[in-house]
Image (cartoon, coloured by chain):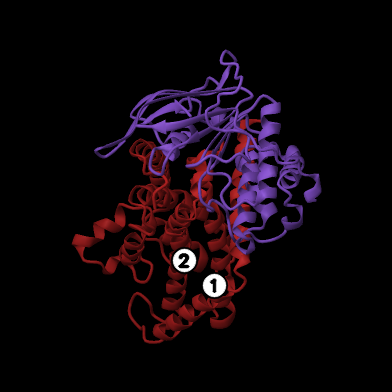
Amino acid sequence: MSALRQDLSAAAAVVRRDFLIAVSYRTRFLAQLISLFLTLTLFHFISRLVRVASFPTPDSYFAYAVIGLIILQVLTSTLSVPQGSLRQELVGGTFERLLLSPFGAVRSLLATTLFPLAYSVVTALAMLLFASVVFGVRLDWATLPLVIPIGVLGALSFAGFGILFLAIALLTRQGLTGASYLIAGIGLVSGLYFPVSLLPDWLRWVSEIQPFTPAVDLLRHVMVDTPLHEAVGIEVLKMVGFAALMLPLAVGAVSLTLQYSRRRGTVLEY
Amino acid sequence: MHSEAPAMAARPITGTTLEIDLTSPAQLELTNIVRRFGSRTVLTGADLRVPAGTIAWLGGPNGSGKTTLLRIAAGIVVPDSGAVAITGLDPARDRRACHRRLGYLSAGDRALYGRLTVAQNLEFWAAVALVEPRRRPELIDASLSRFELGDLATSRVDRLSTGQRQRVRLAMTFLHEPTLVLLDEPHNSLDEHALLLLDAALNALAGRGGSALWCSPAPTAALRADAAYRLQDGRVVTA
């Protein structure tokens, strides 16, 4: 069996483990869906107040906000859930097993990001369906399949940040360090709830130098046909660039943090 | 099930280093290990050699550095100076190869996924231990059988007693047929019968040329120990 196949098999086992743990809490998925549906309902009523030039009808703002909420939910899963899981592994002592496994701690941590991503895609689809069926959000069926390649590219461009937060969690031995600030920041500058054109000039540049704004912009464009903020090529290039830059950097940071913690003797501390 | 376990034979553990062939290849070799934590030097130049086919015991009072030494041997903690070799390999350079050969049991009752069943914990470990998929069922069955966990295979781990959890942890430690096993206080929470099972697992390991180093503050005659050592002032001495 080749090393790659062994690694893929081990990564699949990590995903299966996370799935089994998730389904062992029988009401968690349902409770999360109810919470997300209530959030959508809240935004539906807020959108009734919106009648501005950017959004000529309340429904157009609701469609805009729905996609933002869905992407925020995916981002939260990608960026903060693996960090929380690592914290649980440290407290539960299971991280030690991963550290001593031939699969290794770095690969195990990378594999830990997969289930939350898959889980968030399922909840995102449920939200989209709910918004479409209950509130009549019109989806652009012709371009909707493009969500898959854009979503994959978006996930790759975000994943580096999530992995970097794993390194921070290893170093600080705290969960959710940094991720909650980043998610709040993304909500502010990435056009999740309102167009970035509303941002003051001194803040708008932040929306240009990260992968979240182009991902949100492209996904919203193909799902509900909103106009693009920038040319498609530039937006795709930004996401590819961030994926190419951040992923190796973040994996290197996790590896270095583990080496540092082994040297300090703190790798199993929590 | 209990009747199948081997009978417990009391063995002297201290003051002995029983007929070990010191020229046989070492499964574990620690050379001049020094480790400090802040201003405190826990290990001051520890040397230890565990040859193939040997089960060694390491004792010493609380805080003497037993766990630190085991963690250094496993590659969890890096020594400030000194060398570690597992079956002749450097764990820092050949991490994957070393960990394939290594089984490690930490002290305490953690390192299990409480929401998973016994079998699911073993399946997960077999996968991350990179056991070939076709061999996993056989090795999992053997491990369940070795520690008499067959009846508990579908039980969730967080519903087991502490002693049963310890048997699951031991089953995971031996599952992938390691050649070197490091056990930190392995007899904790085990009843007399479970100690027999562990002793049998150690005998089987030594029988196929493997080695083990187990540690505890005080000796127990229930577990095999071909050689007995203790940590004194940060060094390993014959007990």
| Residue A219 appears in the rendering | yes
Residue B125 is left or right of residue A240, and the answer is: right
Q: Colour of chain B?
A: purple
User: How far apart in space, not on screen, are marks 1 and 2 (Cα)?
Assistant: 10 Å
- According to the image, label 2 marks what residue? A73
Q: Residue B54 placed where, x, y %?
A: 61, 26
Within 10 Å of disc 2 (Cα), the crowding (few <14, some 14-19, many 20+) is some
Contact check, label 1 and label 2, Cβ < 8 Å: yes
Chain coloured red: which letter? A
Q: Position of residue A135 (x, y in %)?
A: 53, 82
Quick one: which residue is furthest to the top in this view? B23
| Labels 1, 2: one chain | yes
Label 2 secondary element: helix
Q: Is residue A134 above or below residue A70?
A: below
**Residue at (56, 24) in percent of width and height:** B17
Q: The disc labelled 2 sits on which kind of residue?
A: Gln
* In this rendering, the label closer to the viewer, 1 or 2: 2
Q: Disc 1 sits on a residue from what chain?
A: A
Q: Which residue is mark 1?
A: A127
Where is residue A252? Give x, y as percent.
39, 38
Label whose residue precedes the other's in the sequence (1 or 2): 2
Q: Nearer the viewer, residue B104 or A231?
A: B104
Q: Residue at x 62, y 38 (%)?
A: B223
Q: Chain of mark 2?
A: A
> Going by the image, does B72 lie left or right of B188?
left
Q: Residue furthest left?
A: A202
Amino acid residing under circle 1: Met
Q: Residue at x 59, y 79 (%)?
A: A133
Is residue A138 shown to the viewer in this render?
no
